[in-house]
Image (cartoon, grey):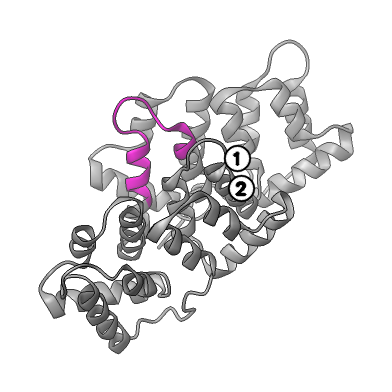
Amino acid sequence: MMHGTIFANDNFDCETACRTLKDAMDGFGTNESDITAVLTTHSNEQRQVIKEEYKQMFGKDLIEDLTSELGGDYEEVCLALLDPPRIYDAHQLHAAVSGAGTSETKLIEIMTTRTNEELEEIKEIYRTEYEIELEEDLKGDTSGYFRRMLISLAAANRDEGWWADQELAAADAQRIYDAGEGQAGTDECEINSVLCSRTLPQLQATLFAYKDLTGNDLRDAIEGETSGSVQEGYLAILDAAIDLQKFFAKRMHEAMAGLGTNDSDLIRLIVSRSEIDLASVKTQFAEMYEENLADKIDGECSGNYKNMLLAIINAS
């Protein structure tokens, strides 16, 4: 069973929370510990109430106060916690296509793991905030089969049924085989049409059907038949279908692998899963890498930023 680490505070006292935040930013210096305590002991829904009440009580915007007092990665994680989830997704997608270059990893993670309903909400927010359709920005910043994959996902038209149809799985396995290993060259359009239109449980059934049909692993076949960003996207879809919590555990590990840490990715992953399945992701992380997520973060991050991430993952 999936469960997060942050829950609604049963003893929610909005006025006290607001005063604690205000006091933490008044006078000389900032009490980051109190800010961390408030933000990690209330659900996102409660944080939205706190934001509104803070303005009502003090005539000031909480986000603006935090931005003026904080900086760096600690500020980024605080602001992430104060965005409603789909608004945060829209902001992250816009950041991925803004400026020089494109963050394909960020695009893939969000677009492949959100439901139809969530994607529709993201598109509406994106349209309102940036006065452009998400699809138009995706088209303008990507190309080739990777663009086609993202546009297919942005259509938010995956099958809604969450019980796998075994006959459909067998037919889809045959389609993918015929488009890839079963011929010279690769028909990415056929592969795209299956991977971007089926639910994750249906794709899981297709993985088994492909193994029965060919004796080969579908993930290996996709890896052998595609390359670049579209390959990363297709593999992300399959990995999410196989085990969503393992998928996010792997993403967190990748954010901290090698020289330095991709802090923006790590923040997004931890914040976005904190009320959904972060406790389960922690378990998977320990099993996959023989190291606790908290210990890994303790070694990779520092200061108030580290304390905030640890507070989120240990909140339960």
**Does residue 52 appear to the left or right of 280 in the view shown?**
right
Of 57 and 154, nearer the camera is 154
Residue highlighted by disc 1: 80
Residue highlighted by disc 2: 88
Q: Which quarter of the rendered picture does the N terminus lie within?
A: bottom left
At label 2, the amino acid type is Tyr
**Does residue 171 appear to the left or right of 277 in the view shown?**
left
Residue 68: % across, % down: 73, 22
Specify start and end residues of the magenta stretch as a single range.
248-266
Q: Secondary structure at mark 1?
A: helix
Q: Which residue lies at the image location 21% right of the left edge and 62% below the top edge?
A: 225
Residue 103: % across, % down: 46, 43
Confirm whether residue 180 shows in the render.
Answer: yes
Q: Residue most toward the bottom?
A: 167
Above or below — where is 21 with respect to 281?
Answer: above
Tell me, yes or no, whether the two marked residues, 1 and 2, touch with CB atoms within 8 Å: yes
Q: Main secondary structure of the magenta part?
A: helix
Of 249 and 57, nearer the camera is 249
Confirm whether residue 315 shows in the render.
Answer: no
